[in-house]
Image (cartoon, grey):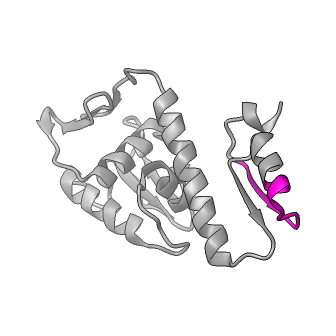
Amino acid sequence: MSCANSAVPVLMLTALGDEPDRIAGLEVGADDYLPKTFSTRELLARLRAVLRRSRLTARLNEAPHPAPVAVAELYIDPSARTASLDGTPLTLTPVEYDLLLSLARSAGRVKSREQLVLDAADRDFEAFDRSIDVHISALRKKLGDDPKSPRFIETVRGAGYRMRKPDTAAAPSP
């Protein structure tokens, strides 16, 4: 499989920086090309851009009507970008909605902060950005969730967050 047929974004890092080399790299399917020497900030900016484009492409290639997600009394309709709890609509920010959808789609599995950033963020986050924690806290309030005895969103210390499955008994996180 060549780069052009892969869903994985490709950023070429190489010592070859002449125009014919850059053109050849892009023509064989690289999404971006960065010749040495480069700054760490430029590398991170290009990585973010490549990931943003790949997420956009993935969203465009998704089914036209993604299936609704239900976790206990929580109902999320991705087609309408709506969420409700016990039939009552929730007022969520775009990032809160995307976080909730990401967690609900993977109920029972831990999602790291980095995974949540990639799933939900349309802005650039720094490597140690803790704003995901702030968004999770706001989500918990809107869900009426107690972090010490959660109905929906559990903190998994040192790993990230997990949406509880409805049949899982609430237990304090380790």
State how many labels appear: 0
Q: Point out residue 106 in the picture as x, y percentages from the top left corner.
A: 49, 39
The relative height of residue 159 versus residue 151 in the rendered view (above or below) is below
> In the visual, does 19 lie left or right of 111?
right
> In the visual, does 12 lie left or right of 87?
right
From the image, which quarter does the N terminus lie in? top right
Q: Looking at this rendering, what residue extends furthest in the front direction? A: 19
The relative height of residue 128 versus residue 48 in the rendered view (above or below) is below
Q: Residue at x 67, y 46 (%)?
A: 9
What's the magenta region?
10-22
Magenta residue check for 64: no
Q: Point out residue 50 in the picture as x, y percentages from the top left corner.
A: 60, 53
Q: Residue at x 80, y 40 (%)?
A: 28
Magenta residue check for 19: yes
Q: Residue at x 40, y 35 (%)?
A: 167
Quarter occupied by residue 171: bottom left
Q: Point out residue 117 in the picture as x, y percentages from the top left corner.
A: 48, 58
Q: Residue at x 79, y 76 (%)?
A: 37
Q: Is residue 148 among the parts visible in the rendering?
A: no
Q: Looking at this rendering, what residue extends furthest in the right direction? A: 15
Quarter occupied by residue 90: top left
> In the visual, does 161 lie left or right of 101?
right
> In the visual, does 2 lie left or right of 78?
right
Viewer-proximal residue, 16 or 104?
Answer: 16
Q: Is residue 135 among the parts visible in the rendering?
A: yes
